Image: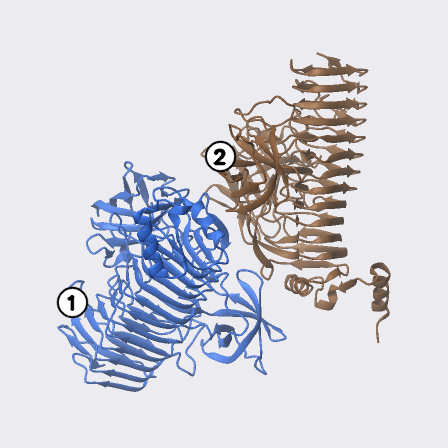
Chain colours: A blue, B brown
């Protein structure tokens, strides 16, 4: 006879899912408390071709290990390409849902939890992604001695421990060891990067430095930092880059349409919590990236990151904190023209090593030929053919080319894959780097969010230089947000920082790069009085922002509150600055035109 | 007007190729003396779907670089799996021919010249594969000092040079550096491994050793070898393994049928000259693997190697010398049973790291379940399904399983993919390791070849232990060959060495492992009087071999001339030993049965 429990479950399923197929994974031997990697993979592959399937996980803690995991070589943008073990390869599905029902998926070692590829209408909901052991090595300063510039740390490295070999500390992990590599010092009280964190950068072993293992939990470092770190400093070290520390993102969405992430928590990842590329329409709701209670840090890289997407990206009601990189980044990619081969075909090169292998474009995409010197568009056309040569280079054939090929270095930008972005009611804080990086040509609305970041609050950059993250923006509204103690890493960052990043060989062109950016009615708690920096923007509206002095960090800054370079049609209006004890000014370069500064309080034009 | 030259060419093409399409690559911008990688790739991809195509290369030296080469992640058996640049990806073609017309294809850096996959009737002929810079680093001893155990070498490293850093020598290559890694000392006079080469193994840097760069061409080593190497010693060093030195084989045949390699020379490779896996019928004729005139060494690994093939492998009229590993190896793979999952499905694990990613079987293949303790077969069945999990593990579903699953550790062996082998008129000499390794169940005939190898001449092993190279042989004839100075590396190797390789936990079973091996009428020039070692063989016939004493290396050996362990039905007849000054004996273990020793000259039973 059917148990009442089972009957209720089936009834619940019917009511909520109608005719769609819901699979209780426990019917397939997938039970909490054991390695279920193989069973989950076999179940997923057995469902190939089926639509409207929900995998329902009874609440519990499910374990995933790499040994029996599906594996393939994958290029994952902004990560290190490699053979990757994947626990949930959701490939080619329609209307597929993972409903964790509050479960924790607990990972061990180098394994990527979820990859969604070539799928439509995928929902990931109601689960937590955690790892037995964090990818971020955690060292808390418990003693220090500034005379000999030394400090003693407690290594929070669980059962794995660490060793010291050839004057180098090596952190043990599941089946590898990390050297120090990239690192940053946090403050155990604020749980955020420490003030002037650069002073405490661990420079790695040298002739002058020394590291010593004191016991299984503690180590002593001598001459590893510029300045001796205070007791309570917590170092996050996360291995060498590129190639060594971004191998296991938590969720990867690729070439998929209509993806939904709801009520998902990520406590750790050997890379980003969410990375999406070439996807259309992504909804992220109640996404939490945070550290586990016994740890200070969450992911090795960004909380969320979107490259070359289109449609609408919505991020709402989310908490993103304690990451080793940005809260959100939405951008495209500039690729270099290596050579024009004739017949409308260009030999192109992907510019950044961690974009290697991206799909830059497909036939039908509109692209712009760009000057690599001014980063301004020269010519628009449509892709008719692409042929990948290798992870760096590909052939791009377009419908038309200019009658005369422009002289100088060239790049391409994809115009079709630029998403709209709606961000609301999110908290991004206490992470390394920025709150948000936005370089999409779509309509962007960022409202009712809370930002408190170590570097810039919102960075609108575009660069054909370092990260090659395109491109120029056209329609940005940032309104009713709160920015608190922005730039607390060094004190020299802005809530809003706009401007392309140039190399010494690049220069401003005849047109402005960005346009139509509105920064209005935001509440800013600030120890340094900085509001906005903008270069090469047309139509910039900074209005109705309320900036209040805060005493949380050392006060003041040498930088102007508003800094304008080569902008036009700028309005700075009705912004009020309260309780600042030093003059706050708008500084402009000579080439700023049509600037209106009016009705501000506590702000003057220099 | 058509030039006479072109007319002649077309006429020639018509006469020789009939209606098939012959493409003169020069019509596609593929000319000697420049990087033609992109042009060759574009031409090959433009021919997809066409049959009976010949790419004809006018005689010249064509250059190939990695930058614009096609690239993909590839598992290549007995090599290091990685992203590989490939100059000629011959994928999915029928009746495709590359005719080099005597050309040299000259490679630069990490690039794999030719991969043939999923193709039928492919011919590769009339070309030479070379690399600007060898993968084997070459150091010739020009001074030595046995008092301080030091020596000075000239580094033959072309324009690339070398550096010494942290007491370690680093050899510069196209875009990487090699540490010493694997190495072996050759004798510049014999151009073969030096007598007792192990004495001169470069142990790598340590507290006691020292290496010093004297100038751009010379370096001094102190305490790097057990014994100070004589002047004229040439070290081959070729980097760390696994993972660091077998990344670029010259020719890879995979899942293809009827492949022909004719009149092809390979001067270098960052791996094997020819590696074939899961291919049916391979004909190798006039294949030359040798060092270029200005170098001592050829390939980093074997000259030819065949894993899991079927049909007929023919190797004729070939010269294979100066390699860093065996001349030829024909074998299958033992894979481990990790767990029986029920429903006729086994979780299996590929045993050797350099077999990772092999296709062990496909539906329809006959397989044997094997005891991993005795390496003897227990049960035969047919594969109905395979599912790859990752490069190490896969699921194997078979038609039937034993009523009761055998106890103890188990393995699988593929019975279908075992080729016949015909080797004739080849010279294999002056290489590291063995002449030939043969473990196939097919019919094997090895006749009229010349072997002179540092280790065993012909090794018939089968091991479920180290390399996991299956399996037991059934029909081997080795006749009318010449073996000269076999085992000159240490003096303790046999022209013929037969026997499974056991771990301490493995043991002989109730059946013999190998059977039906005939070693007849061979001519052997020998400084040590060794003829054959055999373990676990049924039906062994050693007859009519002529062994003559040679003075090329220090005489004598402590080992018996013929050594028999756990064999049955053995005939040792009419073998003659000439000019040996010490007694040559047949030694047998107590469990040898039905042994006949008769009519031999200069050989007695112990």
Q: Which residue is mark 1?
A: A550
Q: Residue at x 76, y 27 (%)?
A: B518
Query: The numbered mark 2 sits on a residue in which chain?
Result: B
In this view of the protein, which residue sits in the foreground, A169 or B167?
A169
Q: Quadrant of the C terminus of chain B?
A: top right
Furthest residue toward top: B606
Furthest residue toward bottom: A594
Tag in front: 2 or 1: 1
Furthest residue toward front: A1
Q: Which residue is mark 2?
A: B209
> Crowding at label 2, few (<14), some or many (≥20) Cα neighbours within 10 Å?
some
Query: The numbered mark 1 sits on a residue in which chain?
Result: A
Q: Quadrant of residue B273?
A: top right
Q: Are marks 2 and 1 on the same chain?
A: no
* Residue A102 sits above or below residue B514 on the image: below
Q: How many marks?
A: 2
Locate residue A91 relative to residue A105 in the image: left or right: right
Locate residue B56 relative to residue A260 in the image: left or right: right
Q: Residue at x 56, y 60 (%)?
A: A390
Residue contact at pointers 2 and 1, CB within 8 angstroms: no
User: Where is residue A350 drawn, in percent x and y?
Assistant: 50, 65
């Amino acid at each position: 006879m059917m148990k009442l429990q089972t009957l209720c479950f089936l009834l619940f399923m019917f009511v909520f899912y109608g005719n769609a197929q819901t699979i209780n994974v426990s019917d397939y031997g997938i039970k909490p408390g054991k390695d279920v990697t193989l069973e989950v993979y076999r179940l997923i592959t057995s469902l190939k071709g089926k639509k409207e399937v929900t995998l329902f996980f009874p609440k519990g803690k499910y374990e995933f290990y790499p040994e029996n995991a599906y594996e393939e070589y994958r290029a994952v943008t902004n990560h290190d390409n490699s053979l990757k073990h994947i626990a949930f390869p959701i490939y080619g599905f329609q209307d597929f849902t993972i409903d964790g029902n509050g479960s924790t998926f607990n990972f061990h070692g180098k394994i990527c939890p979820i990859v969604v590829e070539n799928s439509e209408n995928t929902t990931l909901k109601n689960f937590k992604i955690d790892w037995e052991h964090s990818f971020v090595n955690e060292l808390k300063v418990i003693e220090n001695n500034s005379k000999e510039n030394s400090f003693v740390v407690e290594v929070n490295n669980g059962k794995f421990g660490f060793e010291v070999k050839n004057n180098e500390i090596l952190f043990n992990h599941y089946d590898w060891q990390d050297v120090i590599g990239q690192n940053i010092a946090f403050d155990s009280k604020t749980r955020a990067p420490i003030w002037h964190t650069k002073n405490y950068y661990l420079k790695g072993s040298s002739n002058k430095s020394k590291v010593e293992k004191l016991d299984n939990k503690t180590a002593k470092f001598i001459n590893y930092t510029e300045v001796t770190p205070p007791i309570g400093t917590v170092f996050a070290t996360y291995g060498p880059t590129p190639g060594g520390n971004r191998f296991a993102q938590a969720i990867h969405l690729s070439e998929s349409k209509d993806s939904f992430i709801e009520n998902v928590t990520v406590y750790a990842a050997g890379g980003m919590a969410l990375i999406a590329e070439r996807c259309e329409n992504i909804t992220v709701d109640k996404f939490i990236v945070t550290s586990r209670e016994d740890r200070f840090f969450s992911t090795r890289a960004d909380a969320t990151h979107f490259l070359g997407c289109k449609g609408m990206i919505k991020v709402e009601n989310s908490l993103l904190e304690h990451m080793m990189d940005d809260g959100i980044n939405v951008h495209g990619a500039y690729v270099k023209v290596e050579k024009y081969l004739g017949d409308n075909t260009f030999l192109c090169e992907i510019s950044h090593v961690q974009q290697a292998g991206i799909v830059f474009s497909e036939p039908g995409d509109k692209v712009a030929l760009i000057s690599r010197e001014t980063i301004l568009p020269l010519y628009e056309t449509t892709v008719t053919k692409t042929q990948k040569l290798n992870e760096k280079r590909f052939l791009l054939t377009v419908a038309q080319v200019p009658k005369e090929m422009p002289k100088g270095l060239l790049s391409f930008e994809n115009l079709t894959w630029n998403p709209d972005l709606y961000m609301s009611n999110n908290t991004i804080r206490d992470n390394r780097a920025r709150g948000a990086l936005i370089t999409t040509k779509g309509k962007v609305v960022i409202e009712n969010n809370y930002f408190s970041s170590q570097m810039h609050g919102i960075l609108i950059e575009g660069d054909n230089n370092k990260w090659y993250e395109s491109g120029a923006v056209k329609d940005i509204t940032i309104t009713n947000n709160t920015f608190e103690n922005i730039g607390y890493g060094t004190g020299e960052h802005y809530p809003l920082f706009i401007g392309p990043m140039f190399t010494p060989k690049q220069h401003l062109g005849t047109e402005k790069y960005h346009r139509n950016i509105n920064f209005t009615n935001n509440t800013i708690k600030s120890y340094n009085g900085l509001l906005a920096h903008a270069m090469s923007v047309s139509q910039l509206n900074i209005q109705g922002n309320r900036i209040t002095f805060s005493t949380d960090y050392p006060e003041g800054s040498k930088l102007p509150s508003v800094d304008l370079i080569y902008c036009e049609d700028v309005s700075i209006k009705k912004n009020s600055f309260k309780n600042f004890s030093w003059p706050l000014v708008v500084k402009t370069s000579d080439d700023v035109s049509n600037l209106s500064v009016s009705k501000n309080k506590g702000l003057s034009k220099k």
